[in-house]
Image (tube, rainbow, N blue to C red):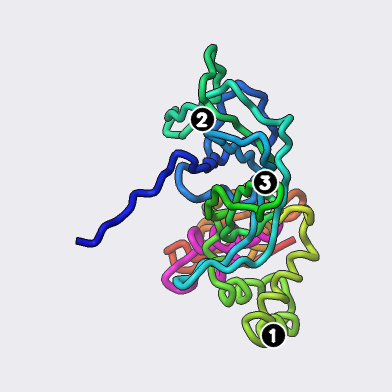
Amino acid sequence: MRGFRIPDTTDTETAFFYFIDQQSRPEPPFTAPLMNMGNNVSFGRDHQLLIWFPSLHDEAAYSLEIHRVRISRQDTTVQEQMLEHSLDPEQLLTGYVQDIFMSEDQPNLRLQSVDNPGDTGAFYLLPVPNSTFENAHYRVRVLKAVSGEEPKVIARRTYQSFWLDMPVSLLNLDVAINMMRFVMDEEQHRAMRRGSREQRERRFREFWAERDPTPDREYNELMVEYFSRIDHAFDNFTTPQNPGYESDQGKVYIRHGEPDRRERTFPPNQPAREIWHYGDRRFVFEATTGFGDYRLIDQR
């Protein structure tokens, strides 16, 4: 029988990560919602990263890195460094223990002080500007450096900045570009559709970046609002004759959003009408088939 050796793990060093759904740094002791018990955080939202070190060595320096990565079956390819931080020993939190519990179907983490700390390790709280990160995969690593030695990775975790409520019409680049015909003239739209995928994606991103009301954040509210209107039009105005975004009501909704007021009338011996009011402006629609299909007959 071939022998084997069980490694000695008494000097094994590691760290554990908790993503806290809190915009500003909470002062311990605190209770805060966890962003997720799995490997996702919410796209477009900043958060706090709580790192627990079961043990630390006084002679070592610790640092943290976050990289955007591409995940494939073969490997994980580093694409861009997003954050680098040297841990300040003065900011370490000692004399606390963590407790995870459920409240109203939401996982929470409680950091509470203890009278007899014993061997509770140390915590470090770091704000992460996740609102500036793309909805992509990331890898966080903690490194330990001892004088005269190469830094050693003592903990790592791969996670995704996940856009949970991403508009369906944004899931596919070509579909998204096709839906932009409602806010572009024909020549602009043809130009947007030309070229390789990389060229189309670049033009798509440039178009919305020029109109981004919050350019310091990755989450573009104007783009999200537009494609959410596309989804709403499809869900609410689709008939056997047309997808909702091709209907007159759908097109008005996409360009102008939710009306300030809707009015339905039933003129004698005439089809039903809907009037959408936007301030002093109004759009009048008339029923055509009796199956929710309305055509625009007047606007002023």
- Judge the density around disc 2: few (<14), some (14-19), many (≥20) Cα neighbours within 10 Å: some
Q: Nearer the viewer, residue 51 or 240?
A: 51
- The overriding secondary structure of the stretch rendered in magenta is helix
Taking 289 as reference, is 49 left or right? right
Q: Nearer the viewer, residue 228 or 153?
A: 153
Q: Nearer the viewer, residue 167 or 54?
A: 54
Which residue position is annotated with label 3? Answer: 146
**Sooner in the amino-acid sequence: mark 3 or mark 2:** 2
Asked if residue 114 is positioned above or below residue 82 in the image, the reply reads above
- Give the image location of residue 126, x and y in percent: 67, 39
Residue name at image x 69 percent, y 60 percent: 81
Residue name at image x 58 percent, y 52 percent: 153
Cβ atoms at labels 3 and 2 below 8 Å apart: no
For the residue labelled by badge 3, is the local secondary structure a helix, a strand or a loop?
A: strand
Residue type, mark 3 in image: Val
- Judge the density around disc 3: few (<14), some (14-19), many (≥20) Cα neighbours within 10 Å: some
Which residue position is annotated with label 1? Answer: 190
**Sooner in the amino-acid sequence: mark 1 or mark 3:** 3
- Give the image location of residue 10, x and y in percent: 45, 39
**Sooner in the amino-acid sequence: mark 1 or mark 2:** 2
Range of residues picked out in magenta: 222-250
- Give the image location of residue 142, x and y in percent: 61, 48
Which residue position is annotated with label 2? Answer: 109
Residue placed furthest toward the bottom: 195
Separation of residues labelled 1 and 2 (CA atoms): 51 Å
Residue placed furthest toward the top: 115
Asked if residue 36 is positioned above or below residue 98 in the image, the reply reads below
Residue type, mark 2 in image: Leu
Quarter of the image with the C terminus in it: bottom right
